[in-house]
């Protein structure tokens, strides 16, 4: 009663079910989801020990993970925004994804619906069959003939058991096995041990391998590889190997999937191994995982890690939009990067918020860059296509403190000095602004292609990035990258690649996974 006096009305949005529910602050998220029928009541007891209620929560105000969450979830999952519903208190509006909640364990056989008892004629036939079976040398007499729930003889017990088992539908799918995900990136190999029982990572670490991982596994014992890392490999059946090195056309033996990755299955010793690597640039693999994580249909998928490849996902197929003649380099790759980014800047470019105020800034995020580009246009320092005006051609109304920030580099290209103090410099180059325009035009071209050439309706646009970019959606809308009519139908999701990769264990074959969740693939050449 005390808490109800101070609780507030909030909204819980379930993204993967496209639902919004009213809730009260202070309540357990687990109990709320059970009450609303989102989590089966028999899932577990909600004690934070089994990990079955693992879900994604997009809420910046969440408290630090509890001790039980740290014991059940890998740090990678926690960093990506995953928590246990039973350990989470509703503190405000939340956007969640419950697709990772595992099914409850098989219920007690006594909870199953008991079939009707056989008729007298059926009993006569059953007794005859049992009598014949008793004469068979394969027949083993029951240990006890004690009557059970009113049954008069063992035959009726056997018949009841047979009918009860028949009432349970047989599964056509093999159970999902435990596995290991190996990711080779940047000269290091990370491993993640997947548990099918809780649909989560139970152990992670790194391996000392400097050579190509595919070649290494082909020539070395997998057991020896994990000798000092894992105590038991007996439950491991499958290993998924992901490398960020593009495939070599000369040595390519795998099957190309979605025009992005090469996929090959091999058996190494007792293990079934899936090998996946990008066909072109490393960002192709990020885009591939972004596609796999998409559950909504009639969506335009734009990966800012690889904006040159935009996909439209309809109800039955995936279409790669034909590419335009633009730079193959991604804008996100040419922005200044470092450990001390500029977090915010005032519209007049005079005041800055830096991560570490006592150190020189050396990085600029994509959302902030978009905002600055928009201000350059508004303040007449650049035209509508983000072309910087030379200092001599600036409008006379432009204040002098802005004019001195416009410069010409040694190669003749224009630049704008966003931050310049005591020799420290963070600048916006014309090349960056040109790539921003390419991004804008490419997205708008993709929208037009779907609407006019495919004659399909776009129900939403999804922006995806490999790393979280605070305020990205607002900046993209402000800069005009997203067409105005889709402003309210655009969402931005970041940092889900590894979580999506773990979902690959839910299907025995990656090709079946794609067929099940995405449908047929149509390449750009087929659309021209």
Image (cartoon, grey):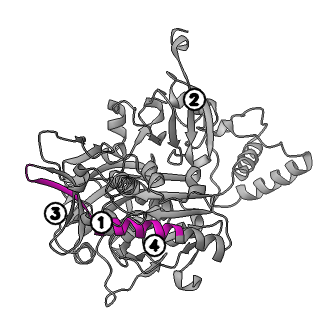
Disc 1 to disc 2, how far (Cα)? 62 Å
Q: Is residue 354 above or below residue 402?
A: above
Instruction: Classify residue 227 as left or right of residue 85.
Output: left
Name the residue that disc number 2 marks.
Answer: 32
Name which of mark 1 and mark 2 comes first in the sequence. Answer: 2
Disc 4 to disc 1, how far (Cα)? 36 Å
Picture coordinates of residue 265, whole percent (x, y): 41, 76
Q: Which mark is residue 292?
A: none
Name which of mark 4 and mark 3 comes first in the sequence. Answer: 3
Judge by depth and name the residue closer to the eye, 42 or 466: 466
Name which of mark 4 and mark 1 comes first in the sequence. Answer: 4
Q: Is residue 176 visible?
A: no
Q: Main secondary structure of the magenta part?
A: helix
Residue at the front extreme of this rendering: 396
Name which of mark 3 and mark 1 comes first in the sequence. Answer: 3
Instruction: Classify residue 351 as left or right of residue 149.
Output: left
Q: Which mark is residue 309?
A: 4
């Amino acid at each position: 009663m005390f808490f109800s006096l101070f609780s507030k009305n909030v909204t819980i949005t379930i993204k993967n079910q496209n639902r919004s529910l009213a809730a009260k602050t202070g309540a357990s998220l687990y109990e709320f989801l059970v009450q609303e029928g989102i989590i089966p009541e028999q899932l577990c007891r909600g004690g934070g020990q089994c990990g079955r209620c693992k879900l994604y929560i997009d809420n910046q105000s969440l408290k630090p993970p509890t001790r039980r969450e740290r014991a059940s979830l890998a740090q990678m999952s926690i960093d990506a925004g995953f928590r246990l519903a039973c350990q989470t208190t509703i503190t405000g509006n939340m956007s969640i994804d419950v697709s990772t909640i595992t099914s409850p364990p098989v219920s007690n056989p006594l909870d199953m619906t008991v079939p009707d008892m056989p008729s007298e004629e059926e009993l006569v036939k059953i007794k005859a069959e049992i009598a014949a079976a008793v004469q068979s040398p394969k027949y083993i007499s029951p240990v006890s003939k004690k009557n059970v729930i009113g049954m008069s003889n063992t035959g009726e017990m056997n018949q009841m058991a047979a009918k009860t088992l028949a009432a349970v539908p047989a599964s056509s799918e093999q159970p999902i096995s435990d596995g290991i995900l190996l990711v080779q990136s940047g000269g290091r190999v990370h491993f993640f041990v997947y548990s099918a029982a809780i649909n989560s990572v139970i152990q992670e670490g790194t391996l000392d391998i400097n050579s190509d991982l595919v070649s290494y596994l082909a020539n070395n014992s997998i057991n020896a590889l994990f000798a000092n890392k894992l105590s038991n490999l007996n439950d491991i059946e499958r290993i998924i190997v992901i490398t960020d090195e593009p495939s070599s056309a000369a040595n390519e033996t795998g099957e190309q999937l979605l025009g992005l990755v090469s996929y090959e299955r091999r058996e190494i010793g007792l293990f079934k191994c899936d090998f996946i690597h990008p066909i072109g640039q490393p960002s192709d693999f990020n885009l591939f995982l972004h596609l796999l994580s998409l559950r909504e249909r009639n969506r335009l998928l734009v990966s800012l890690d690889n904006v040159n490849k935009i996909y439209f996902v309809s109800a039955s197929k995936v279409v790669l939009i034909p590419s335009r003649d633009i730079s193959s380099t991604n804008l996100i790759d040419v922005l200044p990067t470092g450990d001390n980014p500029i977090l915010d800047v005032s519209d007049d470019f005079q005041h800055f918020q830096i991560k570490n105020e006592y150190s020189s800034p050396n990085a600029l995020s994509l959302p902030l860059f978009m905002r600055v580009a928009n201000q350059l246009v508004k303040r007449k320092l650049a035209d509508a296509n983000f072309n910087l005006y030379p200092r001599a051609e600036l409008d006379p109304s432009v204040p002098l403190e802005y004019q001195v920030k416009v410069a010409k580099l040694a190669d003749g290209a224009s630049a704008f000095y966003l931050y310049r103090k005591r020799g420290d410099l963070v600048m916006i180059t014309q090349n960056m602004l040109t790539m921003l325009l390419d991004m804008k035009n490419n997205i708008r071209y993709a929208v037009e292609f779907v609407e006019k050439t495919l004659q399909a309706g776009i129900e939403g646009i999804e922006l995806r990035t490999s790393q979280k970019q605070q305020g990205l959606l607002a900046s993209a809308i402000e800069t005009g990258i997203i067409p105005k009519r889709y402003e309210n139908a655009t969402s931005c999701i970041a940092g889900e690649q590894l979580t999506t990769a773990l979902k690959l264990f839910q299907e025995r074959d990656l090709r079946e996974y794609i067929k099940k969740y995405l449908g047929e693939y149509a390449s750009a050449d087929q659309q021209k």
